[in-house]
Image (spheres, rainbow, N blue to C red):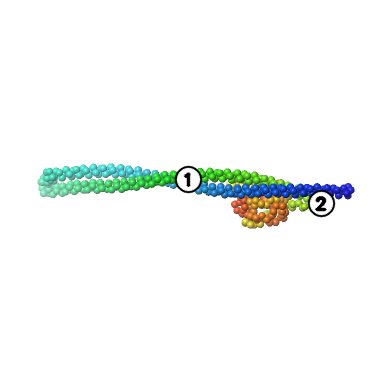
Amino acid sequence: MPASRRRGCRIFVALGLAFFLAAQAGNASRLTEKIREEQLRVERHQHQLEERRAALHVAKLRENDLSHQLSETNNAIGNVNTRLGQLDDQVHVNERRLAWNQVQLAAAQATLRRHNDAYRRRLVQIYEHGDLGYLGVLLGATSFAEFVERFHDLQLVVRTDQKAIAERKAAETAVRRVQAQLEGTQLTLQGLAHQQEQARTQLQGLASEREQLVAVASDKRRQVAAEVAQLEELSASEEATLEALIVQRQQELAAERAAAERARRAGQPGPSGPATAGSGYFQWPVTGPITSPFGWRIHPIAGVRRFHEGIDIAAASGTPIAAAESGRVIYAGWYGGYGNYISIDHGGGVSTGYGHCSAIYVSVGQDVARGQAVGAVGSTGNSTGPHLHFEVRINGKPIDPLSRLR
């Protein structure tokens, strides 16, 4: 091929590469702007989500507190009902005692009446006829010894009558005293029962009021929970869009690498492509134990079964995070539940991600070297404590980072 023709081909290739690179640069700029806009939307929705989650937490606490108060009120009503039942039993026992004492009192009074009647008749007899009965008994004795014996017998009879009357009066007094005590106890029990009944009525009113408050709190909690679920769906959709844009940016970086390689082969100067990973294996970004492996798990905040797309490495807040391999930063900023997040493209569709950072030291488009500090460990986003969430993705699909870490 003549030299002039070869020069023409090189010029044509150079012009084509220049136009391609310029178009790629324009596309990259527009895509970067799209990523930035989507990032802002994700941040905005994430802030709204965090606000509503906080409101949901408050609503749950309010509902739980009111439910606890309602439970305490219902327990108090149960205790009052138990106490009322005990008082009813005591009242019934007391009433039975009163009834028996009434019987005893009536019997004592009847006996006393008989003795009093006999005593009055005796007095009338003595008044009208003189006390001839006892005297006749004494004069009927045939000897002095019999007279003495009859005299002692008559004394015994008189004392027995007097004692019987005294005992009946004492019994009547005792019965009346017990009767008075039982009646006082009855009044006390009835007063206590009345107080307990009033307390039960008040507690039932309080329980009804608290049931209404619990119902209102439950409605509020469900409303906020629905808002949270809606925002979570929206955030998930926005994050998926952002992730698609990042994958698209990875594809553009791959095209830039290919263009740079073609320029190099054509012997034409041009911008160097993004750095590519060497062996395909990565160094550990931080040192620490794995607190949550790759795969399905119960989400520590949501409490539902979700797929964990990376590994969690425990480390103190502020610990430097090293780039697992050389590459170009394709995302650096807030990324939904990941909090502050960094994504580094390493070529060949391979990227690494670093989530929950407390600080970010790099920016989008920056080339980084293996082991370079790109951020610091933190607990931003959906996190229960300081740690690094580390991901490895191939063409946007997560794989177990342990298969690539050395």
Dot 1 amino acid type: Arg
State yes or no: discs 1 and 2 in contact (Cβ < 8 Å). no
Residue 283 makes an appearance in the image: no
Bin the neighbour count of mark 2 within 10 Å (Cα to Cα): few under 14, some 14-19, many 20 and up: some
- Residue at (88, 49) in percent of width and height: 4
Left or right position of 237 against 115: right
Q: Which residue is mark 1?
A: 210
324 relative position to 119: left or right? right
- Mark 2 lies on residue: 268
Image check: 261 left or right of 353? Answer: right
Q: Between 103 and 256, which is closer to the camera in this rendering?
A: 256
Dot placed on the residue nearer the N-terminal end, 1 or 2:
1
Q: Residue at x 37, y 44 (%)?
A: 88
CA gap, disc 1 and disc 2: 81 Å
Q: Position of residue 250 (x, y in %)?
A: 72, 48
Label 1 CA crowd tier, 10 Å (few <14, some 14–19, many 20+): some
Tell me where residue 300 appears, x and y as whole percent: 59, 49
Query: Looking at this view, is 189 or 92 the one in front?
Result: 189
Q: Is residue 162 visible?
A: yes
